[in-house]
């Protein structure tokens, strides 16, 4: 691989591992790849590692079998979808009825009358909303008003992120109901309906969504205008009710996904394939991006949440190559975290432009669960810390004096968190100082009016495997060497 220079801050070696590996789901091949990835001595986000076993798995019969399994896994109507998707809700509902749950599970169950409880698309099912809490036993809360939403979602949160399964018709029915009821209720309480952010639409098509919101084009026009058939693929008719519900309640639609032309480069070339224009549009907060990746829990997240789908993507040839030496595990992870960061930044940019509104994001469940996809990034961007944008290339020094050693550079347009320290800016996380240069007294950076955001997450019908368990009880916190691993989600909405 070429040296990784565009984001030198990502090139720090992986922190020393103590030999312990958390359980990794997925195939044996994926487990070996993940373990090699974690223990590589190369840069830990784009490290060069000898992925043992992958080369031996390339013979024709194994590849054909994996491709068939991938097609089944990603089928638009997977066999047994309803009982599989409803398994988590059923197990928790049964546990509450029995008066207890396994020690590995904990949740508060909010039984929901009205649209969020009984609007299920599958006959004979009941919808329940679970609030995940750090406790040993679930507590069922009484809800006397059928139209009442959890206070945290309707009143206190600036952003609610809904995690769906793209191939689940049940999830699509639920998300349309959620969009309809939540935008209406939030609009009534806040006086202004929230925006609705969509993973399904790429950012360059924002003017198309704006035209739809103004009534200039119909919902059927969106299919061609957003090039849906080549850029998203999943059936448009499953998402059309979301568009219509948002428009009916006056909620603007916001495109979140980066352009296909940019995304398709990363699984083959990694982050080094990004141009300066790409970085400025999708990844302007390079230091914050790197800081998220260096979080001690991120390695467990990568192993347990992101990497298990690597084999499926390679087998289905969805990475641009079926050769794992080209579409490497490192590039796969890089492409994934890039999308998370780009979508989080698109939402943050909109929320700062229109600070009166909240936002409902609808994205795939893997971008939501265990926090390190979009949620942690939005929380970082919306931390309320002072944020600055470089007006020109800036030098970073390891001290607040002109004689201090140069430790790095910030590119023009790059966003960073810093506090004023005398005549200089002290970057968050002891990453250096920006000093006035050229005798002008100017720091060469402009203050960005950042908005403090409170974020909540809702997962639709997560399976036991998605909760990192082979039984019905999920792991409510990310298994990690660090005891403070993030929760699976703030809420789970399930059909029981």
Image: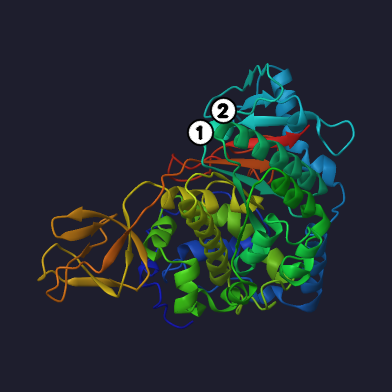
x 59%, y 57%: residue = 306
The circle drawn on residue 156 is 1
Q: Residues within 10 Å of mark 1 (few under 14, many from 20)?
A: some
Decide if residue 28 is in sight here.
no
- Under circle 1, the secondary element is helix
Q: Residue at image x 54%, y 53%?
A: 374
Residue 236 position, x and y percent, is 80, 59
**Which residue is located at x 58 percent, y 75 percent?**
262
* Residue 185 location (% of width, % of height): 64, 33
**How many numbered circles are shown?**
2
Residue 80: x and y in percent read 86, 46
Q: Within the image, what quadrant is residue 92 found in?
A: top right
The type of colouring in the image is rainbow
Q: Quadrant of the C terminus?
A: top right
Mark identifier at residue 151 = 2
Horizontal arrangement in the rendering, residue 269 relative to residue 63 (left or right)? left
Tell me whether circle 2 and circle 1 mark residues in contact (CB < 8 Å): yes
The answer to whether residue 146 is left or right of residue 282 is right
Which mark is first along the chain, 1 or 2? 2
In-front residue for pair 479/138: 138
Please indicate whether residue 265 sits to the left or right of residue 69 in the image.
left
Provide residue 481's location: percent of width, then percent of height: 44, 45
- Image quadrant where residue 111 sits: top right
- Determine whether 331 is above or below 247 in the image: below
SS for tag 2? helix
- Find the distance from the CA under tag 2 to the CA under tag 1: 7 Å
Q: Residue at x 73, y 19 (%)?
A: 97
Q: Which mark is residue 373?
A: none
């Amino acid at each position: 691989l070429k040296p990784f220079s565009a984001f030198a801050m990502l090139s720090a070696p992986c922190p020393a591992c103590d030999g312990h590996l958390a359980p990794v789901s997925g195939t044996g091949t994926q487990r070996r790849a993940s373990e090699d990835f974690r223990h590589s001595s190369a840069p830990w986000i784009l490290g060069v590692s000898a992925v043992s076993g992958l080369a031996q798995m390339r013979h024709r019969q194994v590849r054909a079998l994996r491709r068939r399994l991938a097609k089944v896994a990603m089928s638009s109507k997977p066999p047994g979808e309803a009982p599989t998707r409803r398994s988590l809700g059923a197990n928790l509902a049964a546990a509450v009825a029995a008066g207890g749950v396994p020690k590995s599970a904990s949740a508060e169950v909010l039984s929901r009358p009205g649209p969020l409880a009984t609007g299920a698309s599958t006959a004979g099912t009941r919808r329940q909303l679970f609030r995940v809490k750090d406790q040993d036993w679930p507590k069922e809360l009484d809800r006397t008003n059928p139209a009442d939403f959890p206070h945290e979602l309707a009143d206190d949160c600036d952003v609610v992120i809904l995690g769906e399964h793209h191939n689940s018709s049940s999830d699509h029915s639920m998300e349309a109901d959620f969009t309809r009821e939540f935008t209406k209720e939030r609009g009534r309480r806040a006086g202004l309906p929230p925006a609705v952010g969509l993973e399904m639409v790429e950012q360059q098509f924002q003017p198309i969504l704006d035209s739809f919101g103004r009534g200039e084009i119909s919902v059927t026009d969106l299919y061609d205008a957003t090039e849906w058939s080549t850029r998203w693929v999943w059936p448009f008719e499953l998402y059309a009710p979301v568009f219509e519900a948002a428009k009916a309640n006056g909620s603007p639609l916001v495109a979140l996904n980066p352009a296909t032309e940019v995304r398709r480069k990363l699984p083959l070339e990694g982050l080094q394939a990004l141009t300066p224009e790409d970085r400025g549009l999708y990844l302007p907060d390079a230091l914050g991006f790197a800081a998220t990746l260096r979080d001690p829990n991120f390695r467990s997240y990568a192993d347990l949440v992101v990497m298990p789908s690597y084999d499926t993507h390679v087998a289905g040839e969805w990475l641009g190559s079926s050769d794992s030496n080209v579409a490497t595990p490192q590039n796969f992870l890089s492409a994934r975290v890039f999308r998370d960061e780009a979508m989080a930044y698109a939402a943050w940019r909109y929320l700062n432009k229109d600070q009166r509104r909240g936002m409902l994001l609808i994205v795939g469940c893997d971008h939501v669960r265990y926090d390190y996809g979009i949620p942690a990034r939005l929380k970082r961007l919306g931390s309320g810390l002072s944020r600055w944008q470089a007006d020109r290339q800036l030098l970073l020094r390891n001290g607040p004096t002109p004689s201090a050693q140069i430790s790095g550079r910030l590119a023009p347009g790059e966003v960073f968190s810093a506090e004023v320290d005398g005549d200089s800016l002290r970057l968050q996380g002891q990453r250096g100082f920006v000093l006035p240069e050229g005798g002008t007294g100017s720091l060469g950076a402009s203050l960005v009016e950042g908005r403090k955001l409170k974020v909540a997450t809702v997962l639709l019908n997560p399976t036991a495997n998605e909760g990192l368990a082979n039984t019905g009880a999920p792991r409510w916190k990310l298994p990690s060497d660090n005891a403070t691993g993030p929760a699976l989600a703030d809420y789970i909405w399930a059909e029981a």
